[in-house]
Amino acid sequence: MAATATADAPARGPMTPVPYRVVSRAPETADTWTLLLEPLAEPVVPAPGQFNMLYAFGVGEVPISTSAAPDQSGILVHTIRDVGAVSHALVGSRPETVIGVRGPYGTAWPLEEARGRDLVIVAGGIGLAPLRPAVYHALEHREDFASVCVMVGARTPQELLFVRELEDWRGRFDVDLDVTVDSARGDWHGRVGVVTQLVPRAPFDPATAVAFVCGPELMMTFSARALIGRGMPKESVYVSMERNMRCGLGHCGHCQLGPTLICRDGPVYRFDEMERLMEVREL
Amino acid sequence: MRTIDELVAESPAFDGLTNEQLELIAGCARNVGFEAGERMFREGDPADTFYLVRKGRVGLSTHAPARGSIVIETLDPGEIVGWSWIFPPYVWHFDARAVDDVRAVAFDGACLRGKCETDHALGYELMRRFAGVMIDRLLHTRLRLLDLYGRDGDS
């Protein structure tokens, strides 16, 4: 009797990557690329906000959040900024290159908690990438939410991610999108200012809204303060933390922040759980 | 159509002022409009006006050699454009240009300065409000100096 493939195949260990083939790579900005990855074995299926460990063979592994939910064929979408040796190898991966994927890891954006409430999304720089799946989800299940406000900040117009999507969202009547940049040339017709300036004018009810904030830690801190200053309870504000994640399993301790391991207990945390740790200078 | 008196009284910028003070301020005000791209004032020129934006967006900018016009802040409806009229040497520090068609209430700064000199209570209130505008702008500038969107660890 022929054994089934499942019975014959050794169980995949938690550190064993799934091979994925690069389907395409598209530039978002001068240093940021989006890769579409096709599974060559059983796919990993991340939820919005979760991350995968992406392995450039022979170079190393880095944690990268998904920037879109996988489609039915299991295609993964990762948007990667070229900031180091591994990310440089990943963004340089041509179609047909095989890379390794472990995951999904970590906590997801609490979209269920936001059901029936105003959803506020605040993104800074590359932080829009981990939030984009949450925006997609909100748009696909628009009736599940009251208002949907998306606020995006970047250094310059040239550093804005997903410009086509931003235009699409701006054209919708059921989403309030506001975009701002730190500075711009004279041909820019949008806002110039910091993303926190968008919070006071955004159309949401602070008493009942749920906010997802993602970007560099400083940006999240000041954005969370602006949201709380508007009247939101701290318990309704979520942030996505980033630390030096290595194993993704909570074993190695590289991503420890005080009593928590970001890869296992995060990256998405309630702000009131993270605020005190973010203020500790020694961490 | 709303009168100048009503527009001034309804603006949060003048919230809390007495009716008499509001009348004094409205007496120095007029409605103005700028077409998209039109310059509202120019860096280095005398600052004898400030604006309360009613409609449209205003860009504050400066000219950088070989880089052209750099927009450093935009201001939207409800916001004040210009505080240089209240502090010596009363000259604009930046250019202001209508990003799109702008409707605004323009206030004669020289007229208001004169009223503030004779009515110190009004002067205090206006100084307090414009100090608030300046503090907001300073905080936003400092946040930008922090490079909020830079990678954690970037210098």
Image (cartoon, rainbow, N blue to C red):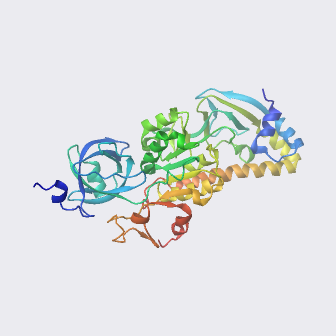
Which quadrant of the figure contains the N terminus of chain A?
bottom left
Above or below residue A26? Residue A65 is below
Of A230 and B44, nearer the camera is A230
- Residue found at the very far front of the displayed protein: A1
Q: Measuring from the top left, give residue A59's x and y in whole percent.
A: 23, 59
Count every numbered label the image shows and give the total.
Answer: 0
Of A199 and A187, nearer the camera is A199
Q: Measuring from the top left, give residue A232's x and y in whole percent.
A: 63, 55
Above or below residue A132? Residue B152 is below
Q: Residue at image x 40%, y 52%?
A: A47
Of B58 and A236, nearer the camera is A236
Q: Measuring from the top left, give residue A253's x and y in whole percent.
A: 37, 71
In this rendering, would B102 be left or right of A75? right
Above or below residue B93? Residue A5 is below
In this rendering, would B49 be left or right of A90? right
Q: Residue at image x 70%, y 44%?
A: B84
Residue A248 shows up from this direction: yes
In this rendering, would B122 be left or right of A40? right
Q: Measuring from the top left, give residue A3's x and y in whole percent.
A: 13, 56
The answer to which quarter of the image holds residue A103 is bottom left
Above or below residue B43? Residue A239 is below
Residue A179 shows up from this direction: no
- Residue found at the very far left of the displayed protein: A1
